[in-house]
Image: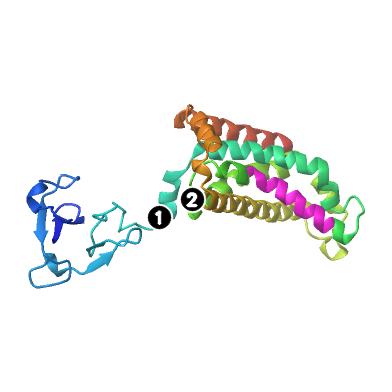
Amino acid sequence: MGYLVCNKCGGTYKLQEEESPDDFENCECGGKLKYIENIEPTPNSVNHQRGVKCPKCGHENLDKVKFCGSCGENLLKEKKSFKSLFKTLNFDIILIGSILTILALILSKILFFDIVTGQEPVTDSEQSLYTLIYFIIIMMGSFIPATLKKLDYKTAALHGTIIMIFPATFFWIGVLGFYNELLSNYVSSSLEGISLNLIFVLVTAILVIVYIIVGLLGAILATLLNKKLNLSEKNVWIKLDNYINTITDEQWKFGYLSFLITIILLSLMSLI
């Protein structure tokens, strides 16, 4: 039967029974097709290339071809660089997640902040439980929107980080400016020579990093759940995605920019 090889994209197609090379004029990409009898390397094979199996369907293609000749799978998937990841950002997910994170942070503060920071006396086991619940609630800010679309894990991690970083910074600098007073109660005599403002900055930086990790994990877990349960193919998720898609990417970007400006202004006002 033999194979047809495209001279443009390198794709291969295995001829089926009763099919002839004359039945095909050009590849789908527009390239010219060349007939070879065997995909194994021989003196007469194209570029002496070796066969490579498609990871998706198992079809054998010539080495270094771009797409599988049977199912069209990309056989030369490039690893995404950190810079290229930013081109895949979904600002709808980021804006929705950022707003949900702000709401989750406020709710968590009302319910558990005094317990987590030790201002309300509880047992160690109770404090550990409340701390876990505290961070689970906050994680929902990145978990919920990340279930809406299929993302790879690197992209999901980037979304979770961006979703969390600005709300967390605002929360600690803007909303909890009084945290200086709380810290002063825990500064030991050995740290009396260190500026309380410096300690506040360091503690804030550490906590923001913790929140970023929480957001990152939330988005990754949502992506795992999406892939395991095929949530993107469920009617509810399809309807939500269609509703979100009625707003253009430019509008989502403008909305997120407005959100960032608001966060920055509120944080600056709290420092004045």
Q: What's under tag 2, amino acid-wise?
A: Thr
Residue indicated by mark 1:
80
Instruction: State which quarter of the image contains the C terminus.
Output: top right
Q: Position of residue 13 (x, y in %)?
A: 19, 55
> Does dot 1 land on a helix, a strand or a loop?
loop
Seen at 34% across and 57% down, the residue is 77
* Residue 254 left/right relative to 111: left
Seen at 91% across and 55% down, the residue is 122
Label 1 close to label 2 by CB (< 8 Å): yes
Give the magenta-colored segment's residue range: 127-141
In terms of depth relative to the viewer, which is nearer, 73 or 185? 73
State which quadrant residue 80 falls in: bottom left
In terms of depth relative to the viewer, which is nearer, 147 or 217? 147
Q: Residues within 10 Å of mark 2 (few under 14, many from 20)?
A: many
State which quadrant residue 54 falls in: bottom left
As drawn, the residue found furthest toward the right would be: 121
* Residue 59 left/right relative to 2: right
* Residue 177 left/right relative to 227: right
Q: Position of residue 217 (x, y in %)?
A: 61, 54
Q: Is residue 91 above or below residue 43?
A: above
Q: Residues within 10 Å of mark 1 (few under 14, many from 20)?
A: few
Specify the color scheme: rainbow
Q: What's under tag 1, amino acid-wise?
A: Lys
Residue 155's disc number: 2
Question: For the image shown, how many numbered marks are present on the structure?
Answer: 2
Instruction: State which quarter of the image contains the N terminus.
Output: bottom left
Q: Position of residue 144 (x, y in %)?
A: 61, 42
Say whether residue 176 is visible. Answer: no
State the predominant SS element of the stretch in magenta.
helix
Say whether residue 65 is visible. Answer: yes
